[in-house]
Amino acid sequence: MIRIVSCAKKYNKLKEPSALELPELLSDEENLIWVDLYNPTDKEAGILTDIFTFHPLAVEDCLSTVPNPKIDDYGGYLYVVIHGINADALKRDELETHDLDIFLGKNYLVTFHKGYFRSIESVMERCRKNPALLQGDSESLMHKIIDALVDNYLPIIDELGEKADELEREIIARASQQVLNKLFALKKDILYLRRIINPQREILRNMAGGEHKQICFECSLHFKDVYDHLFMISELIESYRDTLSGAMEAYLSVVSNRLNEVMKVLTIIATILMPLTLITGIFGMNFDNIPLVKSSYGFSVTMGIMGIVVLAMLWFFKKKGWW
């Protein structure tokens, strides 16, 4: 699907032209054009080379899946790849991201994505309701999209923090294999976000630092604000990562203490059985002259001695604080 919206800087009127009108619109620098390609067909994606004449390497990256965020400067335009949260995967209680490819030119913005982006849809709806949003520069429009994308990270990060706190409580209350599996799954999600957000943070730092001529000074200040938000998210992820590392250590400590308690009980049982085994071994020897062998009270006396030994050892263990 291809969606095109444009607005002349002099007129507060939104247009939704066809792809055939793009060459004429692009030739007029007073127009700001936003082309959104959502799961495009091969024919629709052809405008990347036929109309915009983007570099083949940029088009190749755009049509494929780029695992890491990046920014490339091709002189007349910027090619940016950023990642957003997959809303469909969240409904299945899974954490996934998909890439959003952006081409930033002087009077146009091209977005390419194969998954649903809430940020794209929200900004598109805002532009249709208020065409004045398209009367600025193309980098201002890109800022609105990226700002909305970063804001969508915040609820997910907060949810991960709540899960980390809940796991800590579960580990203290009842450390089990199920809790350990949850811990590993949450740690995997946090490390995955860390690999995505940290490079994305560097991209926004470049945009905010005025390293690209396609972004004016005023817009770089707005990107600085988005960078601050992403930096805060990055710091939260690092703190959650430390929290999970502490939770893992707590889990190992709880399991180790539980194992020590079991070993202590088994050791006490084995220690108590040792003198009893000695007594039964002595009276079980095949000699004729063994005390109490012929006595009718021999068994009772032996059991009484064994009972006294058990009680004496339990009293000793209790006095020493070993049990």
Image (cartoon, rainbow, N blue to C red):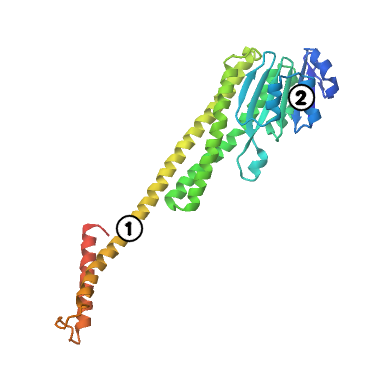
In the displayed structure image, the side of residue 152 where residue 17 appears, left or right: right
Is the residue marked by circle 1 packed among few (<14), some (14-19), or many (20+) residues within 10 Å?
Answer: few
Give the mark toward the camera: 1 or 2.
1
Q: In the image, residue 106 lies at what x, y percent? A: 72, 14
Could you tell me which secondary element the residue under label 1 belongs to? helix
Q: Amino acid at mark 2?
A: Val
Residue positioned most to the front: 286
Q: Amino acid at mark 1?
A: Met
What residue is shown with label 1? 263
Q: In the image, residue 195 lies at what x, y percent? A: 55, 32
Is the residue marked by circle 2 packed among few (<14), some (14-19), or many (20+) residues within 10 Å?
Answer: many
Residue 202 sits above or below residue 27 on the image: below
Could you tell me which secondary element the residue under label 2 belongs to? strand
Q: In the image, residue 282 lies at what x, y percent? A: 19, 75
Which of the pair 233/97 is nearer the observer? 97
Q: Quadrant of the N terminus?
A: top right
Q: Quadrant of residue 54?
A: top right
What residue is shown with label 2? 35
- Look at the image and tell me whether residue 130 can be seen: no
- Look at the image and tell me whether residue 233 can be seen: yes
Which of the marked residues, 1 or 2, is nearer the chain's N terminus? Answer: 2
Tell me the number on the disc at residue 177: none
In the displayed structure image, the side of residue 187 where residue 111 appears, left or right: right
